[in-house]
Image: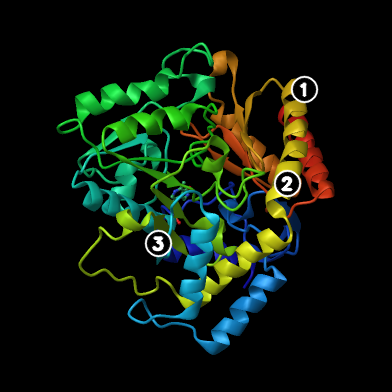
Amino acid sequence: MKKQEIIDKQKKYLFSCVATYYDEPLVVDHAKDNYVYDAEGKEFLDFFGGILTVSVGHCNDKVTKAIHDQTDKLQHISTLYANEPQVLLAEKLAQITPGRLEKSFFTNSGTEANETAVLLAQIYTKCQDVITLRHSYSGRSYLALSLSAQSSWRLTPNVVPGVHHIPNAYCYRCPFGLTYPSCDLKCAKDVEEAIQTTTSQGRIAAFLAEPIQGVGGFITPPKEYFKEIVGIVRKHGGLFICDEVQTAWGRTGGKMFGIEHWDVEPDIMTFAKGMANGVPIGATIATPEVADSMQGSTISTFGGNPVTCTAARATVEVIEEENLVENARVMGNRLREGLDSLKQKYPVIGDVRGMGLMQGMELVGEKKRPDTESTKRLMELTKANGLLVGKGGTYGNVLRVAPPLNVNKDQIDQALKQLDRSFAQLGQ
Ligand code: PMP
């Protein structure tokens, strides 16, 4: 099919709310390693990886071969039967996740992973209330939309009761008007009052948070934040659910999981996106006593699918074998240096933040006014210059730069040049 035909059919046959980037949607035909090709054969350097999902490069040979081999052997069986790829992946997760996390439940998306986590915490604690953060994103089910705290994504007119959103650690726009470190982590300490004033009997099921808020615009908390807030949450009987959907698999550089930078052990962790290099999978892992509190029957038809579990294990193996957690740290530093230089050059860049290969640039006008218009134009300019980056932030004014974990020096330098050219053109 020709490009226009695909765009026309998308408009006619898909829900019109399916959001696409760019004035004219990019029609992707194929991709290899860190490059994507459109329907007319134009090449793009991919620094967004299908939303931080293509961890080890598009159509990675090792992952693709593992998928092919497993597809020929056993493609589907459902969670009603045991299978080797599912238990091997669960064992691997138990080995590489921090603390006492040991038992997994597999699903198909981050949404389901978070649904499972909250349900589990509610069952374990016999409480309903959940605390989460403003500017968070948890998925698109009824509960996950209620957990999410960005009005533009919350399509439902009603919300699930018992979800409380507290101010996040958004240092660039501190909700308390304070400055780190003299703020004394007011945002973390505030959870105490939120529990005392907005919950039933001062007890909660869980605190759910992303180590770095992804859709929120790569908002990165101070290093002491999680230790402080999780300590208070635990005092009130709550579990800590760590949403690693964007921050896992070495993305933040130097550590396999984002939360490991801050020496906090979650009770439950959730994954999706980069876990299987683009093959749909979600996972919820918990400590044995928390996991085993969910009694009765539960089922996920596609959960624990042998092909997706095989793809996930192959992806993690590539990350380990090719030392990509370290690569993310080294390349992340190079990328960050380049972005910081761009900030010096272009006043429209108000903040550069993130860790490893998860770097955001918040675009602003006078007095930090969110510059949504320039962000939209920048997206168009980067596309014209052959670079794919993402957009995010509650105000739609954050560029998200997040290449696959196997990105190399030349690609980082190429992307920085493409960004430089795009910012220069923005000012013309
Ligand atoms: N949690 C986070 C942190 C996410 O970024 C997302 C997706 N953007 C989700 C959950 C939901 O994942 P999915 O789209 O796979 O349902």
Give the spatial CA distance, label 3 vs label 1. Answer: 49 Å
Which residue, given by chain and number where applicable, does mark 1 sit on? 345
Nearer to us: label 2 or label 3: 3
Q: Along the polypeptide, which appears first: circle 1 or circle 2?
A: 1
Disc 3 crowd, CA 10 A, few/some/many (<14, 14-19, 20+): some
Height in image: 44 above or below 355? Answer: below
The single residue placed furthest to the left in the displayed view is 201
In the rendering, at what x and y percent does residue 298 appear?
Answer: 26, 68
x and y percentages locating residue 362 in the rendered image: 59, 29
* Image quadrant in which the C terminus is located: top right
Which quarter of the figure has residue 27?
Answer: bottom right
Residue holding disc 3 = 103
Residue in front for this viewpoint, 377 or 318: 318
Find disc 2 in the rendering and name its residue.
Answer: 384
**Picture quadrant where residue 276 is located:** bottom right
User: In which quadrant is the N terminus drawn?
Assistant: bottom right
Q: Are marks 3 and 1 in contact (CB under 8 Å)?
A: no
Q: Amino acid at mark 2?
A: Ala
Toward the right, the furthest residue is: 410
The percent position of residue 323, horizontal first and vertical second, equals: 72, 55
Q: In the image, what residue occupies the spot 36% across and 76% down?
A: 79
Residue type pointed to by label 3: Lys
In three-dimensional space, the C-alpha distance between marks 1 and 2, rounded to whole angstroms, equals 21 Å
Q: Of the residues under marks 3 and 1, which one precedes in the sequence?
A: 3
Q: Residue at (54%, 88%) from the top-left corner?
A: 73
Q: Which mark is residue 177?
A: none
SS at badge 3: strand
